[in-house]
Amino acid sequence: MAVYTHVPAEEMAEFLTRYDAGELLSAKGIAEGVENSNYLVETSTDRFILTLYEKRVNEADLPFFMDLLDHLAARGCKVPRFIADREGRRLQQLSGRPACLIEFLTGISVTEPKAAQSRAAGKALGEMHAAAADFTGTRPNALDLRGWHDLARKCGEHFDDIAPGLGKRVAEELAFLDANWPADLPRAVIHADLFPDNVLMHGDEVTGLIDFYFSCTDVRAYDVAVTHSAWCFDFDGSNYHPERAAALIAGYDEVFGLSDEERAAFSTLCRGAALRFMLTRAYDWINTPADALVTRKDPLAFLRRLDFYASADPKALLGA
């Protein structure tokens, strides 16, 4: 979430008249994230999230996201639904951007999760995978191994502006993943971005999974690896927390679980997850506009994770 497009109050108030959503009382830009422009909107009847889509989100993909969230919500997952206007339209135009009004879910996201919160996140991910098992929609993952190569080419010589030797390290890791990526594992719809800031909590209870704009069809266990890389380290990647990892995997196993083949490949999947986020952060670090109300995220936080995964005992990553 971020703010790239600034919407005048008068324009936002007029936009809300299309809905049975009350009158605009306040709107505040949300600075976290890097993908879309987001506002927390309060009206005379409720709170909502107003999202304007830009950058990597393709307007043609929005029906997939909408249908997925409707599917998950109908099966009891705590996810925000897209709200239709009086004419049944969920997708709008606002300030020259595709825009949607989205259900507001209560809860807060944690920065440094406890083990119990990690377990709850793992369980929620397992519930999502179970609920999505009969979802028929598909969407290619633009940030798969081929996409990582593309990002690396785009960053090119700028890698070493971030850290000396980073370009060489990326090339070596891509060569390893080219040779070892477990593409034959079961595939399904995945969240692909289940960081702590995309999980809302009350205490140790998950109250919402949000920000599905990277969701796609890919190796299902890769989703667990992404979540592992996001939840099991300090924010800056400097320290690994095995108790969080054990709790996360235990929560996932409680409702869904990893096969023996997925467990055997988990270390490689984690290396891919760490490289993916290092690359997208590096690209955004290089290309984020200076005047955007957005918090740039440190690519080196995921280089540290990548280095850890490359040397870790694979069984220990699963809490063994």
Image (spheres, rainbow, N blue to C red):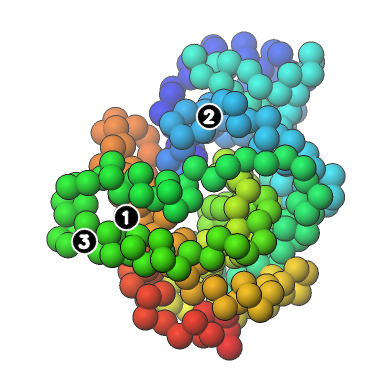
Q: State the residue at coordinates (71%, 72%).
A: 257
**Could you tell me which secondary element the residue under label 1 belongs to?**
loop
Residue 260 in view here? yes
C-alpha separation, residue under disc 3 versus residue under disc 1: 19 Å
Relative height, residue 37 to residue 226 (above, below): above
Q: Percent from the top left, x then y, of residue 230?
A: 49, 63
Left/right placement of residue 3 relative to residue 319 reads left
Q: Which residue is mark 2?
A: 58
Q: Percent from the top left, x then y, of residue 105?
A: 69, 45
Q: Residue furthest toward the bottom?
A: 320
Task: Give the amino acid at mark 2.
Answer: Asn
**Could you tell me which secondary element the residue under label 2 belongs to?**
loop
Of marks 2 and 1, the one in the foreground = 2
Q: Which residue is mark 1?
A: 298
Q: State the residue at coordinates (57%, 25%).
A: 59
| For marks 3 and 2 on the same chain, the one whose residue lies earlier in the sequence | 2
Choose between 222 and 234: the one closer to the eye. Answer: 222
| For marks 2 and 1 on the same chain, the one whose residue lies earlier in the sequence | 2
The C terminus lies in which quarter of the figure? bottom right
Q: Percent from the top left, x then y, of residue 224?
A: 59, 65
Left/right placement of residue 6 relative to residue 61 reads left
Relative height, residue 250 to residue 26 (above, below): below
C-alpha separation, residue under disc 2 versus residue under disc 1: 25 Å
Relative height, residue 206 to residue 240 (above, below): above
Q: Which residue is mark 3?
A: 168
